[in-house]
């Protein structure tokens, strides 16, 4: 459930009519709803009520906006980060360092040092090589890094290939078949306290079964590690829960996920860490755009909007579906190709889409754009970076300025020897 609904024929974000935001901030613009973010945080937390000891660490990569992190931090969430840039955002939003976990296959030495200095709660080590390096760096500083070892459970998450992370040939984690041996090697090193294991098999999962398979494999591994004398106190179950993008699409509810987790992990006796991203932020945001013009096509007309693949990359990158609708629907429908202004055919949001009838100047939204939306933007075609707005009841604020193409150009130099 979200708070983007029609009132008197006009789509509102909570109590704010979207045309007001378009007039004051311009388009394209991402619009987030605080009430929706808070609702999703609460629903996820309540779904895990039967898990006694836990940390819910929001996957910052899904929406790193400072104001969004502030809202979620106030809800008691920690942060899952994959770069020092994300870590600094989480800290700047007031999230306590001990509630930050650091994932990712390519942590640099400089990032490890910065994270140790910040006192983050946990490193999820993704390889033996990384573990050796972190141990050396931490030991040299006279510190002990709190760590889990990320396991690649070789489970097919059944999602898009580009966002699947738990198959044997994906780059993430260590093979489950070698986990015991690698764990043994790293656990003995000064500089690290290897206290558990982590897993994340992919994103936008439409089925709980692959998650349950992965968690069950992890449970067996925990038992084996304990059998080998290791103290296992923490297990990180990652994120991945999918959200509905299409009207009427049914995905597993957080409550069903929570019940499965509680059942599978009942006897583990560990603190569980969760890293939800999309399920918290996805439906808490829309991309508000204006129709530039409608162009005749061979078959269907092209509705050319002022948002493009540089603002919302998911359709171009993954063939992803984002529901598209008018802000002030007139009742009529049309079949159209929804495209942006960028000069490549990939800049297509939808072909042959049945949608509200639209004309030049009309406003429309792409829904479910709160996760992996603004954060994946680029300035391709020198279009600048899109603005972001947070709505709270009847008020709203610009929480990220539009970065004009000119400001990006200002950061470039022509060397003297070229002048
Ligand atoms: N934890 C780890 C280690 C991850 O790699 C991810 C996402 C998450 C948590 C959060 O997963 P979520 O709960 O949001 O599914 N750009 C793609 C999604 C990439 C996901 C990458 N990792 C998209 O737009 O669909």
Image (tube, helix red, strand yellow):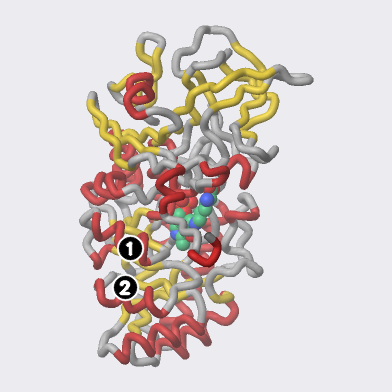
Q: Secondary structure at mark 2?
A: helix
Residue sitting at the far right? 298
| x and y percentages locating residue 21 in the rendered image | 34, 25
Q: Residue placed at 50% from the left, 30% from the top?
A: 366
For residue 276, side relative to residue 178 (left or right):
left
- The CA distance from mark 1 to mark 2 is 8 Å
From the image, which quarter does the N terminus lie in?
top left
User: Looking at the image, which is closer to me, 335 or 381?
Assistant: 381
Which residue lies at the image location 46% right of the left edge and 50% below the top edge? 409
Which residue position holds label 1?
Answer: 87
- Asked if marks 1 and 2 touch (Cβ < 8 Å), the reply is yes
Estimate the x, y position of residue 401 in percent, counting from the top left: 34, 41
- The answer to which of marks 1 and 2 sits earlier in the sequence is 1
Queried on whether the Cβ of the residue with tag 2 lies below 8 angstroms from ligand 1, the answer reads no
Q: Which residue is mark 2?
A: 115
- Label 2 neighbour load within 10 Å: few <14, some 14-19, many 20+: many
Q: Is residue 328 above or below residue 253?
A: above
Q: Residue 58: x and y, percent?
A: 35, 53
Label 1 element class: helix
The residue drawn where x is 33% and y is 71% is 122
The one nearer the camera, 217 or 6, is: 6
Q: For the point 25% across and 48% down, which residue is it?
A: 70
Closest to the observer, 209 or 332:
332
In the image, residue 10 lies at what x, y percent? Answer: 39, 14
Query: On screen, 18 above or below 53?
Result: above
How crowded pointer 1 is (Cα within 10 Å; few <14, some 14-19, many 20+) is rated as many
Left or right: 178 as drawn, with respect to 108 = right
């Amino acid at each position: 459930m979200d708070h983007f609904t029609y009132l008197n024929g006009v789509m509102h974000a909570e109590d704010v009519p979207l045309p007001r935001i378009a007039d004051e901030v311009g388009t394209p613009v991402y619009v987030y709803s605080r009430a929706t973010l808070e609702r999703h945080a609460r629903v996820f937390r309540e779904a895990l009520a039967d898990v006694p000891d836990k940390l819910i660490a929001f996957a910052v990569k899904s929406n790193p906006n400072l104001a969004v992190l502030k809202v979620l931090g106030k809800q008691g969430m920690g942060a899952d980060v994959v770069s020092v840039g994300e870590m600094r955002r989480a800290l700047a939003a007031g999230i306590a360092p001990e509630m930050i976990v650091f994932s990712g296959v390519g942590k640099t030495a400089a990032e490890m040092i910065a994270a140790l200095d910040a006192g983050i709660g946990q490193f999820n080590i993704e390889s033996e090589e990384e573990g050796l390096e972190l141990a050396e760096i931490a030991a040299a500083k006279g510190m002990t890094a709190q760590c889990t070892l990320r396991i690649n459970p070789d489970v097919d998450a059944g999602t898009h290939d580009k966002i699947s992370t738990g198959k044997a040939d994906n780059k993430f984690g260590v093979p489950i078949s070698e986990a015991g041996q690698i764990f043994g090697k790293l656990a003995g090193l000064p500089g690290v306290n290897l206290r558990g294991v982590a897993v994340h098999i992919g994103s936008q999962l439409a089925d709980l079964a692959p998650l349950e398979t992965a968690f069950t494999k992890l449970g067996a591994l925990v038992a084996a590690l304990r059998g080998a004398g290791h103290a296992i106190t923490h297990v990180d179950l990652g994120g991945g829960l999918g959200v509905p993008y299409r009207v009427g699409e049914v995905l597993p509810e957080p409550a069903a996920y929570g019940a499965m987790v509680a059942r599978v992990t009942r006897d583990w006796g560990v603190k569980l860490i969760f890293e939800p991203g999309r399920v918290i932020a996805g439906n808490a945001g829309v991309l508000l755009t204006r129709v530039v013009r409608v162009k005749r096509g061979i078959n269907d007309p092209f509705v050319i909007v002022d948002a493009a693949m540089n603002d919302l990359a998911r359709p171009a990158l993954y063939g992803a579906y984002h529901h598209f609708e008018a802000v002030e629907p007139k009742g009529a429908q049309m079949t159209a190709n929804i495209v942006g202004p960028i000069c490549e055919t990939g800049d297509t949001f939808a072909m042959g889409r049945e949608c509200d009838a639209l004309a030049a100047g009309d406003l429309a939204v792409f829904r479910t754009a709160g996760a992996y939306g603004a954060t994946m933007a680029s300035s391709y075609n020198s279009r600048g970076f899109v603005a972001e707005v947070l709505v709270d009841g009847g008020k709203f604020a610009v929480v990220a300025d539009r970065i004009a193409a000119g400001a990006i150009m200002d950061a470039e130099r022509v060397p003297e020897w070229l002048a």
